[in-house]
Structures are given as structure tokens and as C-alpha cells.
Image: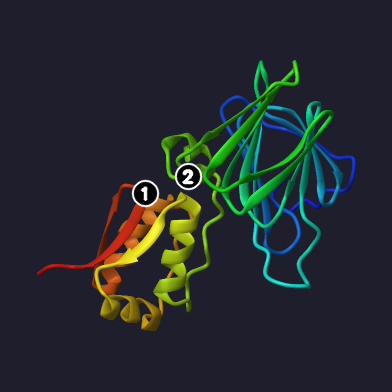
């Protein structure tokens, strides 16, 4: 498989132990496959996870949205309801972690919803475990490594910052309302292609007279001090 290839239903995908893959589905929908994973595209909105982990990022805004993405496993199906979530197969069963929005699970014995900030794991004995998660923990790091970089040229700095915060699972705050207005009114130029999310922040914000701090799940934008 090469960059730019079009996938048809029935396509089988796998990743090596040292690298993942990013797929673009419908507009506003992307899928990231972790290292050492296997996936089959059953339909353009239905995926079958055979090994490893898949992350779904889907923006839902109105009636023209594409159909929600469903991830099928041997233990049940996980359907997005406008969200960011990870489904991972383990030696014990299947686990979903929801970063944003919610996911509907339909299993052999149970149907339930998992909301943002929570996880649910079902094992091969049919037992269900629930718990809370940190949307900004280092366990999401593999997703950031596969993030397609935003085309920032001509976009407001605020849009860039909203995007970075969402990709990192962080809340976005500004030092004050004047700095928020400045971010909304500043137009970016150039490219961040080939950078990581942190490298992009380090490269872009100084050109806007801004810096940042990440602490306790929040990306705080600050003025650059002389």
C-alpha cells in the first residue's frame, strides 16, 4: 500500500511492529492504526479489528455528516457518536477508551454507551469493567506520532491552537481575553509538515508573540515575555 492509494471494501491492512498507519475515510473522518495491528475494511464506514489497536477521529457537525464509523471485534461492535476513541484487542478481551464524545457498544450479552473520559473493557468470559481515563496521558502518544499535520498557511492561529489541543486531548486556555482575540486575529504563514505536535507549537507560537505551558491536562497560551 502506498500514500494516496484508494481502499475498497474487503481490503486488509496490517502494520509492522515498529510503525503505524493513518487512513483518511470520508471528510472529517480519519483512522490511525497502531504498530503491530491488523484491520479489514468491510465497508467505508465499518472496520474489523483483528489485532492491535485502532483510533478513530470523527467530526460530526450536521445533516451532511458521513455515516458513523463502526469498529467490529470478536467481542462486539463499537460505533462512534461523534468522537475520538481507541479500540484495542488484548490477551484478555477488547477495550475502548473514549477521548471525546461517546461510543455505543453492542456485544453478545450487553449494549451500553461509553462517554468521554472513560474506558470499558469486556473479556472473553463476558465480564465488563469500566473506569476513568486521562485523555492527555502518555498512553495516547502513538496517536500523536501518526497525526496528519494541519495546512496552517492562511489559517487563524486560534484554529491551529484548537487543533493541537484536540489532538493532544488537552483543554485550551489563554492568559487573558485579549490574547484570545489576538490568536483569533493572527493569520499564520508557512508549513508544519514533517513536524511533531510539540515541534509545531514551538515553531508557530513565537511568530505570534506567544508561548505556552502544558500542565494538568491544559494547554495554556501565554504572552512572550521580553
140 to 101, vertically: above or below: above
Residue 113 is situated, as x and y percent measured from the top left of the image, at 69, 44
According to the picture, the residue beneath numbered tag 2 turns out to be 135
User: Foreground residue, 194 or 155?
Assistant: 155
Q: Residues under labels 2 and 1: Cα distance?
A: 8 Å
Residue at 65% from the left image edge and 62% from the top image edge = 59
Quadrant in which the N terminus is drawn:
top right
Residue 224 is situated, as x and y percent measured from the top left of the image, at 18, 68
Residue 24 is situated, as x and y percent measured from the top left of the image, at 70, 54
125 to 210, vertically: above or below: above
User: Foreground residue, 61 or 200?
Assistant: 61
According to the picture, the residue beneath numbered tag 1 turns out to be 217
Quick check: 215 left or right of 97? left
Residue at 25% from the left image edge and 63% from the top image edge = 211
Task: Tell whether label 1 touches label 2 (CB within 8 Å).
Answer: yes
Residue 30 is situated, as x and y percent measured from the top left of the image, at 67, 53
Neighbor class of circle 2 (other Cα within 10 Å; few <14, some 14-19, many 20+) is many
Amino acid at each position: 500500500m502506498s500514500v494516496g492509494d484508494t481502499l475498497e471494501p474487503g481490503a486488509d491492512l496490517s502494520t509492522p511492529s515498529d510503525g503505524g498507519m493513518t487512513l483518511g475515510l470520508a471528510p472529517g473522518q480519519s483512522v490511525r492504526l497502531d504498530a503491530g495491528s491488523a484491520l479489514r475494511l468491510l465497508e467505508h464506514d465499518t472496520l474489523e479489528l483483528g489485532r492491535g489497536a485502532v483510533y478513530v477521529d470523527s467530526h460530526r457537525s450536521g445533516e451532511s455528516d458521513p455515516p458513523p464509523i463502526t469498529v467490529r471485534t470478536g467481542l462486539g461492535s463499537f460505533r462512534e457518536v461523534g468522537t475520538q476513541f481507541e479500540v484495542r484487542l488484548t490477551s484478555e478481551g477488547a477495550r475502548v477508551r473514549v477521548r471525546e464524545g461517546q461510543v455505543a457498544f453492542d456485544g453478545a450479552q450487553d449494549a451500553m454507551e461509553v462517554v468521554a473520559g472513560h474506558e470499558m473493557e469486556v473479556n472473553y468470559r463476558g465480564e465488563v469493567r469500566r473506569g476513568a481515563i486521562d485523555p492527555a496521558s502518555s498512553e495516547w502518544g502513538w496517536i500523536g506520532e501518526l497525526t496528519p499535520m494541519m495546512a496552517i498557511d492562511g489559517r487563524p492561529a486560534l484554529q491551529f491552537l484548537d487543533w493541537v489541543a484536540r489532538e493532544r486531548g488537552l483543554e485550551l486556555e489563554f492568559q487573558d481575553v485579549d490574547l484570545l482575540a489576538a490568536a483569533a486575529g493572527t493569520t499564520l504563514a508557512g508549513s508544519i509538515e514533517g513536524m511533531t505536535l510539540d515541534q509545531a507549537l514551538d515553531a508557530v507560537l513565537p511568530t505570534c508573540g506567544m508561548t505556552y505551558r502544558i500542565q494538568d491536562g491544559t494547554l495554556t497560551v501565554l504572552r512572550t515575555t521580553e
